[in-house]
Image (cartoon, rainbow, N blue to C red):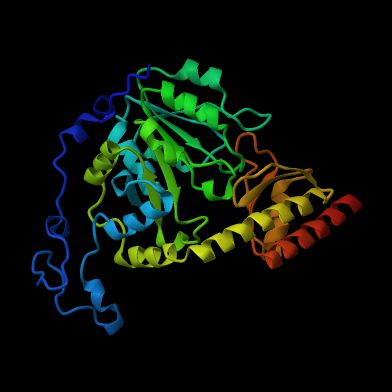
Amino acid sequence: MNKFNLNSLIRENILNLVPYISARTEHQKEKKSIFLDANENSFGAPLSFLNSYNRYPDPLQKELKKKISDFKNVSPSQIFLGNGSDEIIDLVYRIFSRPEVDHVIIFPPTYGMYEVSGKIHGVDVIKIFLTKENYQLNLDKIEKFVNPNSKILFICSPNNPTGNDIKREDIENITKKFTGIVVLDEAYIDFSKQKSLSMEIEKFPNLIIIQTLSKSWGLAGLRIGIAIASEAIIQWMNKVKHPYNISMVSQKMAIKALENRDLFFFHLKNIILEREYLQKSLKKIPIIQKVYPSSANFLLAKINFSSKNLYQYLMKKKIVVRDRSKIILCDNCLRITVGTHEENEYLIDQIQKYSIQKIKM
């Protein structure tokens, strides 16, 4: 039986925190009101088309959350929006982990900000490597490492940089047994056949699911990360966050994008088709030793020769990919984002030419 107790996990200084209450939190905007409470410029911006931006944005992003709620079929009260997913990761550390006392567990190779944020907060980061064969969780090792000071587990599925889904049953079993916070990063879930656990958030009071509008929605420049969790956890995140963490521009643009679902699904379908095309094409090139299965919008490809040399060659051809060879279990691997068909064809052509050069040497 999971003896999960949310308050016992929260840092004492956070439990005693009296949150900052912004002027706009105290009194929501009404068009007919005269706002003289937030020290805004009542005359507006010096450009007429920016006139509405002299006012602060909605600190709780209610209209945007409603749009996301309708699309993802979760309650707005179970949604937190951050300035990118990185703000959410930072908040999880700030709320639940005590510096120099607690530790978190991550599963490399995985998203680097879990470790970086931990180091920033002075929290020990325990690494339990994914299995070498298929990049899955090592359940036996996880059980051995967990102790009362294990506050947070970070699981990325589909995983970055490997692209594979983590087994759903393993995620569920860990979440049920672990008495701390489980953060499930689903940044790439829309590209996967595996369903999001957000639909079952009520079953897991210790689960925080991270999603984003940066990947499948193509809104990376707006910096909008999404956390889906119990209402109790969301309330704590709202208490600790900066007052106006999502700009008015980002909120408005995201709302417009979410209203255009047909184009979203059209692009999503094309990305998945291009992923399959890119994967099949890369496998035919002699220099490519392996292309790992992917449920994301990128592929991890293992190179027979130096991945660094191929990376530098592609850079000269104005193609920028990511060399992941320095990451554990990713020796001589490049991470390649799925591009447009024209971009993918050019990439394949250049790798083929490089492959011919290497074979002739």
Q: Is residue 83 visible?
A: no
Looking at the image, is 361 positioned above or below residue 56? above
* Quarter holding residue 1: top left
Q: Nearer the viewer, residue 60 or 246?
A: 60
Q: Position of residue 131 (x, y in %)?
A: 62, 27
Q: Nearer the viewer, residue 247 or 232?
A: 232
Residue at 14 percent of width and 76 percent of height: 42
Q: Position of residue 129 (x, y in %)?
A: 57, 28
Q: Is residue 185 visible?
A: yes
Q: Position of residue 179 (x, y in %)?
A: 36, 22
Q: Nearer the viewer, residue 116 or 175?
A: 175
Residue at 25 percent of width and 72 percent of height: 53
Residue at 49 percent of width and 43 percent of height: 186
Outermost residue, bottom direction?
A: 48
* Quarter holding residue 278: bottom right
Q: Position of residue 14 (x, y in %)?
A: 21, 35
Left or right: 131 with respect to 356?
Answer: left
Residue at 30 percent of width and 32 percent of height: 96
